Amino acid sequence: MCGIAGEFRFDGQAPVRTTIERMTARLARRGPDAEGFWSEGAVAFGHRRLAIIDLSPRSAQPMVDAAAGLALVFNGTIYNYPELRAELLALGQHFHSDGDTEVILRAYAQWGASCVARLHGAYAFAIRDARKQSIFLARDRLGIKPLYYSLTGQRLRFASSVQALLAAGDIDTSLDAIALHHHFTLHAVVPAPRTVLSGVRKLAPAATLTIDARGHAKETPYWRLTAQRPASLMNEAEWTEAIHASLKQAVKKRLAIADVKVGVLLSGGLDSSLLVALLAEQGVSDLMTFSVGFEDHPDEAGQEFEYSDAVAAHYGTRHHQFSIPNSEVLQRLPEAVDNMAEPMVGQDAVAFYLLAEQVSKTVKVVQSGQGADEVFGGYYWYERMQAEREGSPLDRFRRHYFDRDHEETLAMLTPPWHGPDHTAATVAARLAEPGADEFLDQVLRMDVTMLITDDPVKRVDNMTMAWGLEARVPFLDHELVELAASMPAHLKLGSGGKHVLKQISRGLLPDAVIDRKKGYFPMPALKYVRGDFLEFMRDILDSRTCRERGLYQRAYVDKLLAEPERHHTRIQGSKLWHLALLEYWLQRNVDGM
């Protein structure tokens, strides 16, 4: 895992080295082990390295093959690179390193743009093709690795974070009205290609983007998830066996493809606990696990140590437990916000940030349970949506998911940001795409391919990579996702959600962990806002900067500040935190750039 940046000029000018250096420096926390630069003509690349595979200088980046006219910068991990390397050697390709970086370079040399269909993993990369006078950008199927860009008539710039692009300067930082509507409706999810900044776009998951020397850009999808039953019917036992086998394989390859030790982020929930069990099943010894907890609130516990402790004891892991007081959470919030590539309202963002800080002192790679709820139907709102029998698929979805209805969004934002219900149109179109048998298939497919990318997946990447820690997510292995998408809905929603995972867990985990009520990564202080946290948010929203920005209607702000604990979204997020977080992110990351 690393940080990548680059520039491609269309105006006859050469990129300025100091510009690339500023972008790359902003990515230093993603890649603390080394940095590298390369330029030729109209193109320049920068790279920050987190050494996980082939720790030698032979896998340093940017990686250049002058004879082939190719240069590469890459962020991520290719889990099937040993197999691809062997295949490419048989086809006559030659290698000078032992890692996955050069496999991408040789795969492009052999197969061109179609190479992405052969890559299994989490990745974002850019390849300079001198013969075609083009730049080729690619992002993995589930969008696990980020890739942002700014495209004007004079140049393309790309980077692993918005902050790196802003560091280069010359970016349109005006707010995107459509992105704002998505942000405030889908708990900070802004589907690609938009971001809240008009001058910054992001490459969609499972897509490539080719830009030629005249600045013409062509985006091409290379993978599409279908959610339809297989031709050959399977019973519950067969589905359980198939999912178990696929999940074991996903966990195994995320363990094997590393030249450093791998740990597990153990929340105490079913998903991360099952990862520990599957690793133990495969004979992993001296397994290290990590848990974090926060102060309790009268309405919600701030930690789930009783469950994580039980799993750690059951498997004899080398367990690390961290308790973070609210005073430290508030003190460290600015740092976490500075490391959000886009504004993130999930209350567990700062939790992951603080946990990753501690974990990174011990290991460089962890496995994490993100994605299991979306792939296997674990959230309570799925069952409520399924039970609905009236209205369109959009109606059934938004009644239980949208943070605000359109009318409330208009009451929140000032008139310059008003417009049609953009989010409803986006969601309706995604639900209506062909290739899904039933309503829940439509919902889960959209969640896995769009919503999750800009919520928990981005959150985990940003907050762990801020400490040079690589988080691997086996539940988002694309082959496992494809299999699960074809599974009948009742095997997901049964047993209160994630039925098939609970069946797999029987005998592997304590029943108390399997049968417990669904938990969430707790951070009560950002959900039930009071005391110092309330004053922190009040100061942000009452600041001169916020008032002069003129984004929010003051009557709406005052209503939330007067009764902060009464105003929650349908999935129990704090509406006050939503407003304060966006404004704070803009103040910390955009204002003054």
Image (spheres, rainbow, N blue to C red):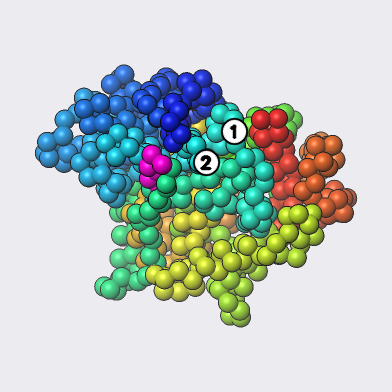
Say whether residue 580 is left or right of residue 428: right
Image quadrant in which you'd find residue 566: bottom right
Residue 210 magenta-highlighted: yes
Q: Residue 81: x and y, percent?
A: 26, 38
| Residue farthest toward the front in the current orientation of the protein | 12
Residue at mark 2: 152
Q: Quadrant of residue 224?
A: bottom left
> Is residue 256 something that shows in the picture?
no
For residue 260, which quarter of the picture? top left
Residue bearing the label numbered 1: 170
**Badge 2: few (under 14), some or many (20 or more) residues near its Cα, within 10 Å?**
few
Q: Which residue is drawn at 40% across and 50% down?
A: 218
SS category of the residue bearing label 1 = loop
Amino acid type indicated by mark 1: Asp
Q: Give the range drawn in magenta.
A: 209-214
> Which label number is shown at residue 317?
none
511 shown above or below 147: below
Name which residue type carries label 2: Thr
